[in-house]
């Protein structure tokens, strides 16, 4: 088994870590925030940060050789957990089928700076994708 670092256009960390890491058919992301891919600035509202965050999730899982359908679990941290309805709007856009959604755990957290939300995910890629 060889570990492979995954990088996605428009997303990077300030520290020397990849967006995700893959071994065989397992893909684990690092922390993903709602930042503008062009500027790196956080979205100005929780709605915008949710949209940007999920756009990054899609790009990262695709860069790893998968799709949103391969995500098995997401963990989300929010500055204000009472704003989950906003999170759910984008969640339902990206995972519309109630019979095929990843598990999710959402927690309140003391996030730094202008960050209102962040997440990570685990994806299990199908065997065909695992050979990439």
Image: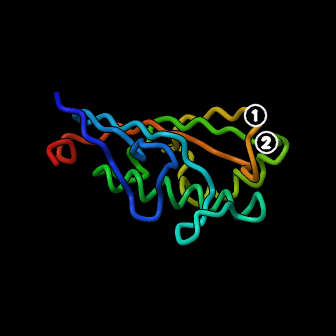
In depth, the one of 53 and 4 nearer the eye is: 4
In percent of width and height, residue 53 lies at: 59, 55
In percent of width and height, residue 52 lies at: 60, 62
Q: Are marks 1 and 2 in contact (CB under 8 Å)?
A: yes
Identify the residue position indicated by label 1 in the image: 109
Q: Residue at x 34, y 38 (%)?
A: 21
Q: Residues within 10 Å of mark 1 (few under 14, many from 20)?
A: some
In depth, the one of 46 and 100 nearer the eye is: 46
* Relative height, residue 27 to residue 52 (above, below): above
Q: Residue at x 19, y 40 (%)?
A: 127
Identify the residue position indicated by label 2 in the image: 79
| Secondary structure state at the residue bearing disc 1 | loop
Specify whether 24 is left or right of 52. Answer: left
In percent of width and height, residue 6 lies at: 33, 48
**Residue lying furthest top:** 1
Specify whether 35 is left or right of 15. Answer: right
Q: Quadrant of the N terminus?
A: top left
Q: Residue at x 25, y 40 (%)?
A: 4
Dot 1 or dot 2, earlier in sequence: 2
Q: How many marks?
A: 2
What is the spatial separation of the Cα atoms under label 1 and label 2, in whole angstroms? 5 Å
| Secondary structure state at the residue bearing disc 2 | loop
User: Where on the picture, by quarter, is residue 35?
Assistant: bottom right
* Relative height, residue 119 to residue 34 (above, below): above
Q: Residue at x 54, y 53 (%)?
A: 95
Q: Residues within 10 Å of mark 2 (few under 14, many from 20)?
A: some
């Amino acid at each position: 088994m060889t570990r492979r670092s995954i990088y996605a256009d428009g997303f990077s960390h300030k520290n020397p870590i990849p967006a995700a890491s893959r071994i065989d058919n397992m893909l684990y992301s690092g922390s993903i925030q709602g930042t503008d891919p062009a500027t790196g600035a956080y979205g100005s509202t929780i709605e915008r940060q949710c949209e940007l965050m999920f756009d990054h999730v899609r790009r990262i899982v695709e860069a790893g050789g998968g799709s949103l359908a391969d995500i098995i679990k997401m963990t989300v941290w929010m500055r204000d957990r009472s704003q989950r309805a906003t999170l759910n709007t984008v969640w339902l856009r990206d995972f519309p089928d109630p019979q095929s959604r990843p598990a999710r755990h959402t927690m309140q957290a003391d996030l730094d700076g202008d960050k209102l939300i962040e997440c990570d995910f685990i994806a299990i890629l199908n065997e065909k994708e695992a050979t990439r």
